[in-house]
Amino acid sequence: MNSRAKPPVPADPVPQAASRTGRRIGHRIGRFLLLLLAGVLVLTLGTVVTGPAPGTAPVDTTEQARSQARAELLDLAAGFEALAAGRSGQVLMDTSVLLSRQAQLFALETQQPGTAPAAPSGQPARPPGGLGESVSRLAAASRWMLGTAQEVEPGLARLLASAGAAGYAQARLLQRETGTPEDLPRPWQPAPASWAASCSGPGGTRGAAEPSGGRPTTADALAAVVVSERKLAYAYEAALPRLAGAAGQAARKRYLQHRELIERWEGIAAGLCVKVPPAEAAWQLPAGLSATPGPVLADAEAAAAAAFADLVAFSGGAVRAQASAGLLGATLRIADTAGAVPAAPGIQVRGQALP
């Protein structure tokens, strides 16, 4: 008996070839259907379906916000310049100059690696509407910038919050000086926040007090806000006896505002387990306070805005939102005391950085 195993019978080549042919046909049919769908999209939506261009990267949220803010500010500046050409008064042209300076600051922001600085689009500005419409649009742009500041990287967050605060203060100044009857849109406001449980809960600033290689932390910036408000309230307290009439009443109102801010930010710091320096019995008064209290207090208000701008950059979440609201309030007080609005309240800008 032959015990050797029989060799395997070769598979029938015809079914295998037929199978491969079927798969190729199915693949071609599927590809044809995808191309057909793309063609339908082109014809119906007017859209060309393409991949990203070689060497390009997707635009991140920060860069998109920077570019959008600059374009909006340039458009607003052109609109107010057009309005100023047909009206008397300097405030409209001042607004155009202010917005142009802000747009230039956004152009100086750091670009993505490998990209060139953004250039003006060259598109004509939106036709200016009436004065009331333009003022309302400026206030709406302020709301957008302050809201967007909560979502971007620290450097741009500070600039957006500063420009947004200046925009709303300028809109209110325009409304007052031009007698614009329309009500302004409500200013941006942060969502309500509870600080009682933030000390031990997630999202607190406990980590901000940890070593950071010498860099400022949220705790440092928050403590600086408290100290700044204490110094400013002390300056007002010293200046009040030297002011009379309407100026004295306005100064007393701002003094009470700063006392409230001290209590609020001390409470936020306590809720976040941030230790602030103990209150001093006295502070060094600004130079010239006795002789010219009004202008000196205006300068002190402008300097105090820097603490809020720093806290915007060195924090996030609910703390950044409260800091943005604090920067808006500080900018409104700057406008009241100085009668003008800086392009970037709370941010020190070198002279060559502006046109």
Image (cartoon, rainbow, N blue to C red):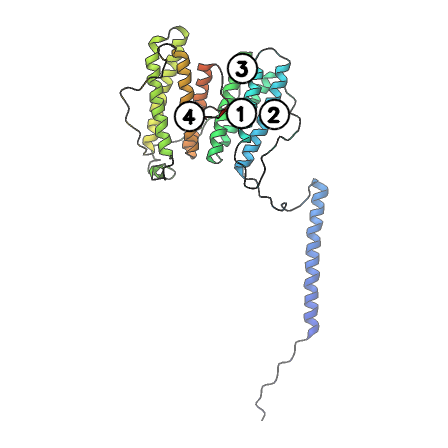
Q: Earlier in the sequence, mark 2 or mark 1?
A: 2
Q: Earlier in the sequence, mark 3 or mark 1?
A: 3
Identity of the residue drawn at 34% across and 21% down: 231
Q: Which mark is residue 354?
A: 1
Disc nearest the viewer among 2 and 3: 2
* Amino acid beneath label 2: Asp
Which residue is at the front of the view, 315 or 159? Answer: 159
Q: Earlier in the sequence, mark 4 or mark 3?
A: 3
Tell me, yes or no, whether the two marked residues, 4 and 3, touch with CB atoms within 8 Å.
no
Q: Is residue 134 above or below residue 43?
A: above
Q: Which mark is residue 75?
A: 2
Q: Earlier in the sequence, mark 1 or mark 4?
A: 4
Disc nearest the viewer among 2 and 1: 1
* Amino acid beneath label 1: Leu
Residue ID for mark 4: 306
Question: Is residue 186 at all visible to an observer of this figure?
Answer: no
Q: Earlier in the sequence, mark 2 or mark 3?
A: 2
Seen in the image, is 47 located left or right of residue 113? right
Q: Is residue 4 above or below residue 110?
A: below
Q: Residue furthest right?
A: 43
Disc nearest the viewer among 4 and 3: 4
Q: Earlier in the sequence, mark 2 or mark 4?
A: 2
Q: Is residue 280 above or below residue 109?
A: above
Residue ID for mark 3: 175
Say few, some or many: other residues with alpha carbon within 10 Å of mark 3 (under 14 / 14 to 19 / 20 or more). some
Tell me, yes or no, whether the two marked residues, 3 and 1, touch with CB atoms within 8 Å.
no
Which residue is at the front of the view, 253 or 295? Answer: 295
Q: Residue furthest bottom?
A: 1
